[in-house]
Amino acid sequence: MDEFWRPFWTVLAVALVVGEVATAGFFMLPFAIGAGVAAVMAWTGLPVVAQWAAFVATGTLAFMWMRRFARSDEVHPIGANRFDGATAVVIKDINHVAGTGAVRMGAEEWRAVSDATDISEGTVVDIVEVRGTRLVVTPARETKSEGE
C-alpha cells in the first residue's frame, strides 16, 4: 500500500500546479506545494500519516502566507478611470452649452466638458468623470492653508 502514495502525491502535485496555471487566484498552488512535500516524504519512505500531516500543514501554511499577496484593500484604477479625482489646467475655454474645451493633465491634452458652468483658460479643474473621449470637469475646490 505504501507504493500507492509515491505516484499519488507526485501526480497530485503536478495536477495542482497545472490547475493553478489554468486558473487565477493562487488557490491551488499552496496545496501543490503541500503535495510536493508529501511526495518527497513518500519517496523517502516516511509513514503515510506523516505525509498527510505534512500535506495539510504545508498546504495550510503556504495558503495563509500567499493570501497576503492576493488580498489588497487598495484599489488601483485602470484605464480612463485612473483620471477620476485628478486635476488639470484648462488650455481652451470650456463652454458648457456647446460642449467644447480642452485641458492639459501632465503631458496629455484632453477634450473637456463641464455640466454646470463655463470655465476660462488657465483655471485649475478637478476631473469628476470620463465620458467617452472627454473629461468632465469642475473648477477645482479651493483648499484652505494650514493657518486658516
Image (tube, rainbow, N blue to C red):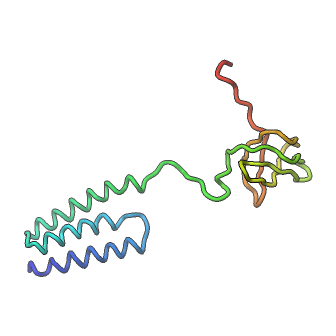
Q: Is residue 35 left or right of residue 120?
A: left
In the rendered image, the residue lying farthest to the top is: 147
Q: Is residue 123 positioned above or below 106 on the image?
A: above
In the rendered image, the residue lying farthest to the front is: 107
The x, y position of residue 50, in whole percent, is: 11, 65
Q: Which quadrant of the view contains residue 56?
A: bottom left
Q: Is residue 96 left or right of residue 55?
A: right
Residue positioned 68% across, 24% down in the render = 145
- Seen from the viewer's position, the closer of residues 121 and 25 is 121
In the rendered image, the residue lying farthest to the right is: 98
The x, y position of residue 83, in whole percent, is: 68, 51
Quarter of the image with the N terminus is bottom left
Residue positioned 34% across, 68% down in the render = 28
Q: Is residue 123 left or right of residue 106?
A: right
Number of numbered discs on residues = 0
The x, y position of residue 27, in whole percent, is: 36, 64
- Seen from the viewer's position, the closer of residues 89 and 71 is 89
- Seen from the viewer's position, the closer of residues 124 and 127 is 124
Q: Is residue 94 positioned above or below 24 on the image?
A: above
Quarter of the image with the C terminus is top right
Residue positioned 78% across, 54% down in the render = 110
The x, y position of residue 73, in whole percent, is: 48, 48
Residue positioned 70% across, 25% down in the render = 144
